[in-house]
Amino acid sequence: MDITAIDAAKMGAAMALGFGAIGSALGTGTAGMAGIGAWKKCYLQGKAAPFILLVFIGAPLSQTIYGMLLMNFILKADPSVAQLGAGIIGGIAMGMSAWYQGKAGAAGSDALAETGQGFGNYLTVLGIVETVALFVMIFIQKAL
């Protein structure tokens, strides 16, 4: 069985979404575990548990959306083998962004629960990490 450019493009499209989603799962899982630990700390200290930690926990989900957008772009472009590489590299880059955004969110959860301060600063860090995924999504589309 021969793999055609159409097949390669479809595989690349699926990988863009898949790797982005894997990163989102790793990122939300990491941030979620830290968020639960931060809430536990608050409960043990008799402090109110900040609901806002859900922002840190959910932030890595956006890379799945970026993966879907890149997938759709790949599927709409003229089929070529280059789309396989674009989907793999783009998906992995977006997935890594999500994973590390989750790690940053985990640190933000811990810090906010302990101090009650710095939410805007921590959120800014998450935004900077997310920018990597946005750049990848946009620049890969320009390359195809």
Image (cartoon, helix red, strand yellow):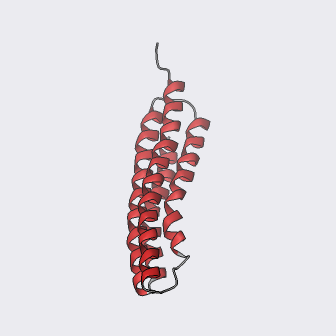
Q: Nearer the viewer, residue 60 or 48?
A: 48
Q: Position of residue 110 (x, y in %)?
A: 39, 76
Q: Residue furthest top?
A: 1
Considering only vertical position in the picture, is 7 above or below 18?
A: above
Rendered view: 29 above or below 3: below
Residue at 49% in and 42% down: 18
Residue 6 rendering spot, x and y as whole percentages: 54, 25
Foreground of the two, 122 or 5: 122
Q: How many marks?
A: 0
Percent position of residue 5, x then y: 50, 25
- Residue at 46%, 29% (x, y): give it: 81
Examine the image and state in which quarter residue 98 appears: bottom left
Q: Position of residue 52 (x, y in %)?
A: 54, 76
- The one nearer the camera, 139 or 98, is 98
Figure check: 86 above or below 59: above
Left-right relation of 103 to 12: left
**Residue at x 58% of width, y 48% of height:** 69
User: At x 45% / y 44%, what residue is drawn?
Assistant: 19
As rendered, which of 28 and 78 lies closer to the eye?
28
